[in-house]
Image: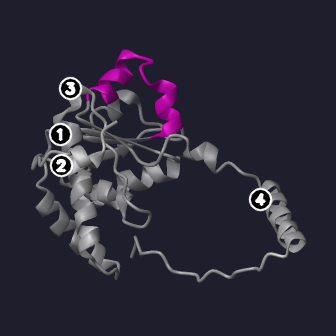
Amino acid sequence: MTSNNSLQDIKSPIDPDDFVIAFCMKFQKWGNTITNELKETWKQNCLAMNNAIKFKSEAKKFVISAPTGSAKTENIITYCAMLPNDITAVISTNLTQEADRLARDINQEANDMRACSYHSKNQLKIEDASKYQVMVTTHAFYEKHNLSSRKWVKAVGERNLAIIDEALTTIQEISLTTNEVTIALNFFESLRRDRGFKKIELPVTSPPKTRP
């Protein structure tokens, strides 16, 4: 795993400055404020993906460790929409609905049909999915089929870029029932009363918009 501190200033297949300009236009349409810190974050995200493509043969992995709300997933959409036709990518995300959305939004932004979603809830065959420049799947589907067949290896393993959108363990981390949440809340409320802790109301802030 390689940190962003060791990123090389690779300007292909997408120039980071061009990427930031394109994403600023997209981000402004949602009514968000653009800061220099956000611009630098987006530039680093583009560089991370450029580096991953450049050093694929060395099996290097690069982490996009941007703060929550900095539009990491939307960065991925714009990056894949800007890819030249000879660069292929696979994206792994948490849910089938999110895979469908990513593929749809990439196509809409690229103004073509370069992306498809491929998972257990659609009828697309792997032979057809492999023809798309960008294939979006789910973590569960990826883990189930990874290295399971020559067709899968050809469709996924030979792509120039593999992107894991959110950690593979996220599904397990958020798998809590309503009853478990209620028990936890009751426990902390009882603890607060018994120990005499003061209840502090935190201010509610609105996250940046990511959709019109």
Q: What residue range appears in magenta?
A: 138-158
Q: Position of residue 115 (x, y in %)?
A: 30, 46
Do the residues under discs 1 and 3 have CB atoms within 8 angstroms?
no
Q: What residue lies at 24% left-to-right and 40% top-to-bottom?
A: 133
Task: For label 1, count other residues whose C-alpha is less than 10 Å away and answer few (under 14), some (14-19) or many (20+).
Answer: some
Q: Earlier in the sequence, mark 1 or mark 4?
A: 1
Mark 1 vs mark 2, CA separation in Å: 6 Å
In the rendered structure, does residue 149 fall within the stretch colored magenta?
A: yes
Give neighbour class at mark 2: few <14, some 14-19, many 20+ (Cα, 10 Å).
some
Which residue matches tag 4?
A: 181
Residue 57, which numbered label? Answer: 3
Q: Residue at x 77, y 80 (%)?
A: 198
Label 2 sits on what residue type?
Leu
Spatial separation of the CA atoms under disc 3 and disc 2: 19 Å
User: Which residue is label 1 attached to?
Assistant: 87
* Secondary structure beneath label 2: loop
Distance (Cα) linking label 4 and label 3: 45 Å
